[in-house]
Image (cartoon, rainbow, N blue to C red):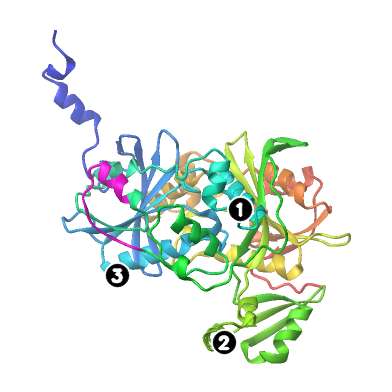
Amino acid sequence: MTTLKNTPDFEALIRQFHHAEGSALAPLSPEDRPLHGQTLYLASCELEMRFGNFRAHIFQDIIDKHYLIALAHGDITSAEPLHIRMHSSCVTSETLRGCDCDCVEQLESALELIAKKRRGILFYLMQEGRGVGYAAKARDRMIVQASGDRLTTFDAYAAMGLKKDHRHYDNISQICHLLGIRAPFNVLTNNPDKVAALRAQGIPIAATEPLEVEPSPFNLAYLTSKATCGGHNLKRPTVSKVRRAAPPEPVDAFRPHALANARRFIYAASYFLPIKQVDDCALLTGEQYQKITDAHRALILEHTPLRDNRHLVKISPAALAAHRKANPGDTVTDLLAAPYWFRTHVYYDIVTCQEHVVLTHGQPRAGDIPVVRLHSEALFNRFPLRTAANRDKMKQSVKHIITYGCGALLLIYNDGRGAGFGAYATDLMMTQTGQARTTDESYRKLGISYDSRDYDAAMLLLRQHIPNEKIQMVMNNPDSLVKKNEYIAALKAHAIDVDRWIFLDEHPVYE
């Protein structure tokens, strides 16, 4: 019996069906979308990093639907060894500016090293929480904090019935095919399992190089667990002399449950996230401020008194570093370098199959008008871009909330005004290559509307945390209100009264 493979036109059929090696670097047409295995090429665009220019190649796994980004620098197709890192996403450190892990430091260190080597790739993989997703990762943090750090991250995973690591790296060899990469890898990692995964795919490994950062009081427990239980080659956590920092309040663990008046949302976790200071400003109580000014006035550059006997103090980083070196045991240095503590609430949405994140600060009292920000994700702003407008907006929104004393920030994940990261990246590619003159034109060619974000979902979750009817709403600028009819309609539909609009190009004074 003759098989299809033995028919004369089989090889020609396969050549017609498959995309050739390197086809993502040179698509046949603007509409061509090379596919290899389960990895689909979507777009390419230029990104200006602080360390130099990178080219972002965006892919999507057509089975589990997650995005993958290959951040390439220099010539990636020559035969010389190529410095690479496989980096798993971390929304808390890379978007929300949390400091309870080392992910963003590893991300930026790897990109800086690749730029210095003049060629290499960082594979950015959307595998939050070692592949379990943010809802499970948040439950891990809740359990660890509820235990007073007596349990490790890996103890928490075991308690949830999870493996230590649910990540896979099957897409890497497929991306290499689509980008025409044949060079052996110098892998930037502390994790031997990643090296083994690459070798299992037939990718040659020339060398490995560690990427280790100095522990802080806020990530020491996590890094120690990675070193002792997670199989990572880390030396610094076990010899560090820094003191572990505890959350400002006790944390209670709870079982996931649906919200009574919005059952699409499963309340999965709540824990404290330490967020990095903005503009080197420490937030102090009146008692703490008095203690600082009595003995350490030279460390203070500016001082702003706030309501409720709180103080925002701008610190000289150079003076603080010198003081820490000269006085290693002085707790004042920890106080002035302390982050802002936000309560992190994580919900799983059974409608969209996505997580929703709400950060809250302070407790609204009768008469308070909490400061609120609906902050849309900009995935590229997780990277050290030369200009990162969305990250700056996040920082200033946090500063508005802590300055007033209570409020909430809701993270809306979908890039591209709700159309998703794939659409956003394609828009950038089209405008950068002249296929569209403006974003509005590229959106028309993509076949999507101006704004498809789910503001109703955001308002339902906001209502869980802001009991007061009045809020102060943080927006980018007055013009953004003109185009956001759905935004205004959702506020009205959920009876949320905006007492004051705070625009990020203004500097309000809080009473």
Q: Nearer the viewer, residue 96 or 216?
A: 216
Q: Nearer the viewer, residue 246 or 263?
A: 246
The amino acid marked with disc number 2 is Asn
Quarter of the image where the C terminus is located: bottom right
* Front position among marks 3 and 2: 2
Q: Is residue 323 left or right of residue 464?
A: left
Separation of marks 3 and 1 at Cα, in angstroms: 38 Å
Separation of marks 1 and 2 at Cα, in angstroms: 31 Å
Q: Is residue 336 left or right of residue 403?
A: left
Q: Are marks 3 and 1 in contact (CB under 8 Å)?
A: no
Q: Position of residue 270 (x, y in %)?
A: 67, 50
The amino acid marked with disc number 3 is Lys
Residue at the image position 59 percent from the left and 43 percent from the top: 355
Please indicate, yes or no, whether residue 27 appears anywhere in the rendered image: no
N-terminal of the pair, mark 3 or mark 1, is 3
Residue 144 — which label?
A: 1
Residue at the image position 63 percent from the left and 87 percent from the top: 301
N-terminal of the pair, mark 1 or mark 2, is 1
Residue at the image position 78 percent from the left and 44 percent from the top: 494
N-terminal of the pair, mark 3 or mark 2, is 3
Residue on which the image places disc 3 = 116
Residue on which the image places disc 2 = 327
Q: Which residues are magenta?
A: 195-210
Q: Position of residue 495 (x, y in %)?
A: 82, 46
Q: Secondary structure at mark 3?
A: helix
Question: Would you say residue 199 sits in the magenta stretch?
Answer: yes
Quarter of the image where the N terminus is located: top left
Please indicate, yes or no, whether residue 455 appears anywhere in the rendered image: yes
For label 2, count other residues whose C-alpha is less than 10 Å away and answer few (under 14), some (14-19) or many (20+): few
* Front position among marks 3 and 1: 1
Residue 371 — which label?
A: none
Direction right: furthest residue: 366
